[in-house]
Amino acid sequence: MVTRFVIQSYTTDTGLDFRLNLGLASPTLDAAFIWLKSPSASADIARPLSLTVPFSRPGVEVTNGSDGAIKQVKVPQGLVNVSVRDNCEYHLECFYQTNVGSKDVNGYYTTNGSAFATWVVKNPAVAPISSTGASATRCSG
């Protein structure tokens, strides 16, 4: 089994469209994708509240944090963990299924290895509201 995490991303002067495809939910059905779409400039691009998983698929479990933002997405082939660094940056950490453990007391999956890929989403120009510097960049894996 091969895990597919495929990216489609573009930025314009007014927004950002980033999709992290989540591999397969079954042999004949994809597991959808994590989507960050902002049609206009917004400081929210740099916050996980802007992330969505727009389709419901069997075997795909989306866990939200206390703020309502996506914290983890568990798929049959692995896990994407959302790790907030600060008001301008968060990371999408991608783990193979073999590195995903059980849930902790807070209801989040644990991991027992390093992420095979990490995507950094940041907008260093959050004030004034801007998307000019917004980016989603693969930094490891």
Image (tube, helix red, strand yellow):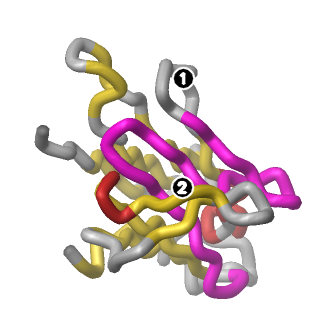
Quarter of image, res 41: bottom right
Is 63 placed left or right of 123 in the picture? right
Q: Is residue 84 magenta?
A: yes
Read off the residue under disc 2: 14
- Name of the residue lying farthest toward the right: 66
**Residue at the (44%, 53%) spot, across then down:** 79
Residue 69 disc label: none
Q: How busy is the neighbourhood of tag 1: few (under 14 within 10 Å), some, or many (20 plus)?
A: few
Amino acid under disc 1: Phe
Read off the residue under disc 1: 55
Q: Which of 36 and 69 is in front in this view?
A: 69
How far across and down, in percent of the image, does residue 133 sit? 48, 77
**Residue at the (68%, 86%) spot, across then down:** 86
Mark 2 or mark 1: whose residue is earlier in sequence: 2
Q: In this view, does 120 lie above or below 60?
A: below
Is 139 placed left or right of 91 in the picture? left
Quarter of image, res 126: bottom right
Q: Is residue 76 magenta?
A: yes
**Residue at the (68%, 67%) spot, across then down:** 47
Q: What stretch is highlighted in magenta?
A: 61-87
Where disc 2 sits, the SS reads loop
How far across and down, in percent of the image, does residue 24 sit? 29, 30
